[in-house]
Amino acid sequence: MERIDKVVEAFNRHGFLAEKFADMNQAKTALLKLIRPEETVGLGASMNVKEGGVLDALVGRGQTLFTNMTGPDRTPQETDAMRRDAMVADWYLASSNAVTEQGELINIDGVGNRVAGLIFGPKKVVVMVGQNKITKNFADGMKRIKSEACGKNARRLSRATPCALDDRCHDCDSPHRMCNTVTWVQRPNSWHTEFHVYIIEEDWGY
């Protein structure tokens, strides 16, 4: 059995609704069938969703979205309100910083809205993740996030953190620090009615 098949099996054994897809287009097609056009969707910032064309597809069919990735620039107050609206949407859509071979999700957040959306936001969740996010275990997942994702995200968001300069974690106390909250989701919570994990046999995101 291939590694991805084993990861999908592990997620399903843990109560997630996990599937693998050969490419992002297949995953996007499945997502658009799963989420009805009239349902609302909260989004955590995700390069997978944006670069994979998922965001454009949702916008194109008139989906009501709560996200910073679309629309005009918002004031801090408008951004806060949008993040709160995302917590009570019909669905929450995000990626994951890492997934483990044991069928677990690992995420690091600076504001907290994305991890909140995954653990106690909408009752229905979809996580879309590329094969490059698969790690052996929790420790390897954290190592991957610190060395592969944090610096890239800091540069993307113009954060003045040490990792933005050298892609190394300095366990900093910068006011721009994004590593404030870590979640290790081992099972869907009893709160959830559906928790889908789409694993794509391509490299996507940080």
Image: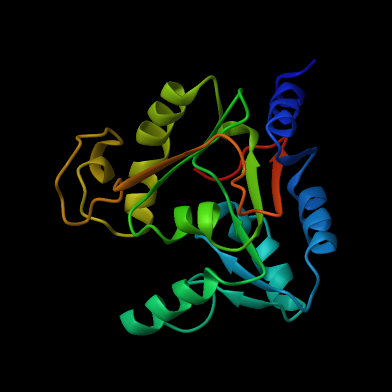
What color scheme is it? rainbow
Q: Quadrant of residue 79?
A: bottom left
Q: Quadrant of residue 129?
A: top right
Describe residue 159's horizontal placement relative to residue 46 as left or right: left
The residue at the point 52 percent across, 52 percent down is 119
Q: Quadrant of residue 30?
A: bottom right
In the depicted structure, whether residue 192 falls above or below residue 121: above
In the depicted structure, whether residue 97 falls above or below residue 28: above
Residue 1 on image: x %, y %: 80, 15
* Number of residue marks: 0
In the depicted structure, whether residue 121 falls above or below residue 177: below
Describe residue 96's horizontal placement relative to residue 129 as left or right: left
The residue at the point 59 percent across, 46 percent down is 189
Q: Can residue 75 be seen by looking at this rendering?
A: no
- Judge by depth and name the residue closer to the eye, 181 or 1: 181
Residue 159 on image: x %, y %: 26, 56
Q: Residue furthest front?
A: 190
The residue at the point 77 percent across, 57 percent down is 31
In the depicted structure, whether residue 40 falls above or below residue 189: below
Describe residue 99's horizontal placement relative to residue 146 as left or right: right
- Judge by depth and name the residue closer to the eye, 126 or 170: 126
Residue 41 on image: x %, y %: 64, 70
Q: Can residue 149 be seen by looking at this rendering?
A: yes
